[in-house]
Image (cartoon, rainbow, N blue to C red):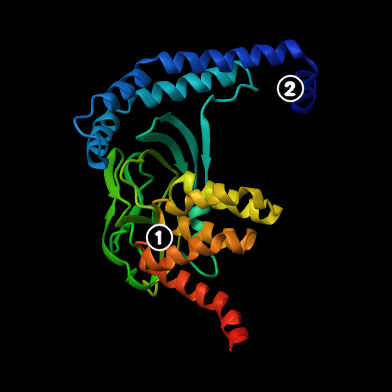
Amino acid sequence: MNIAQDLKDWLADRGRQRRTQRAIDGFARAWDRGVVQQHLTRAMADLPAKSAEAVAAAARALLADDAWLDRAIAGLAEAMRADPYFEPPFRAMSGDLHAGLILFEDAHLSIAAGVTRISELAARKDGKRGATSVGFSGRVSVLKFVKAGGARISLWEAPPITASFSAATAGQCRRTGERRLADGDILTIDGRHQTYVIEQARANLLVLQAEISLDAAPLGVEYDSRSLAYVGCSAVRDGASRIQMISTLLRKLGAAEAAPVLAGFLDHPDFFVRWHVMRELLGLDAEAALPHLKRMAARDPHEDVRRAARATLDRLQAPSARKAA
């Protein structure tokens, strides 16, 4: 088959495109109504307590029997053999090492099936800097290594990531051990203070990963595997990242009329969001931001935010003091 010509023909044939879309929509409907989806939905609804630990326990039970994954993969393969332009109706996930599909998602839990590529792992290990990053996700995860690829992993711990996290008190991470994975192994990793690193593998890994949103830490934190020192952090929740991005955009656009809306985020539960919004508010309308800055300097619950607000306030008030003198 001439692939280029077939694609050209498909793009010109609205009927074929509609048939492809009907196949995708049909697969999605069958999945949503299927045994797996309904079982997962009921399991989440019937939790005795809404906590990360309760969801993790339910996830372990759900991942123990992965025969449904074989059926899902077989169904996708059959659909793609029937129509090469069929696309799985699942949200894709991708990264430096991992690629896969999110098969289930609700307010508490997402379950993804993904492949960890040995070629990418080897390229990272053989790079100039080597594998120097040890990341703590900030969320509890349950992982089932359907195909373990003969992998050897190291296990790590760090001080718990809490709402009062500070770079000054982040401490160091520490290696707590290692283990060789076998097909079917299930691990629960509390990413608020635990993580793992794949040190070595003989083949690609097929992993089912349940990631739990409940009780997540505000930040994911990264340490250096050689010095064990804190390197940096990033927001865990999508909402926090969006607020930061939008507040920066509004400041760049000079949208001063948005200042009252931004000020509403100065009570956000995540300390780094409060400070980011304050910085953008100062850039947008310093006069309107000043009362909020004074209040933040006096009463913000996070020590680093209070300190930064006081330092900023001192700099802003210094010219007035010199002028008065």
The x, y position of residue 31, in whole percent, is 44, 18
The x, y position of residue 219, in whole percent, is 40, 55
Closer to the eye: label 1 or 2? 1
Dot 2 crowding, Cα within 10 Å, few <14, some 14–19, many 20+? few
Looking at the rendered structure, the kind of residue marked 2 is Met
The mark tally for this picture is 2
SS category of the residue bearing label 2: loop
- Figure quadrant of the C terminus: bottom right
Distance of label 1 from label 2 (alpha carbons)? 50 Å
Residue at the far front: name it: 324
Dot 1 crowding, Cα within 10 Å, few <14, some 14–19, many 20+? many
Looking at the rendered structure, the kind of residue marked 1 is Val
- Figure quadrant of the N terminus: top right
Q: Residue 153: in sight, yes or no?
A: no
Q: Residue 159: in sight, yes or no?
A: yes
Q: Earlier in the sequence, mark 1 or mark 2?
A: 2
Residue under the point 46% across and 21% down: 74
Residue under the point 52% across and 73% down: 312
Residue topped by disc 2: 1
In the visual, does 266 lie left or right of 36? right
Residue under the point 46% across and 13% down: 30
Foreground residue, 47 or 287?
Answer: 287
210 vs 34: above or below: below
In the visual, does 98 lie left or right of 1? left
- Residue 102, label in figure: none
Residue at the far left: name it: 48
193 vs 43: above or below: below
Residue topped by disc 1: 221
SS category of the residue bearing label 1: strand
The x, y position of residue 115, in whole percent, is 46, 41
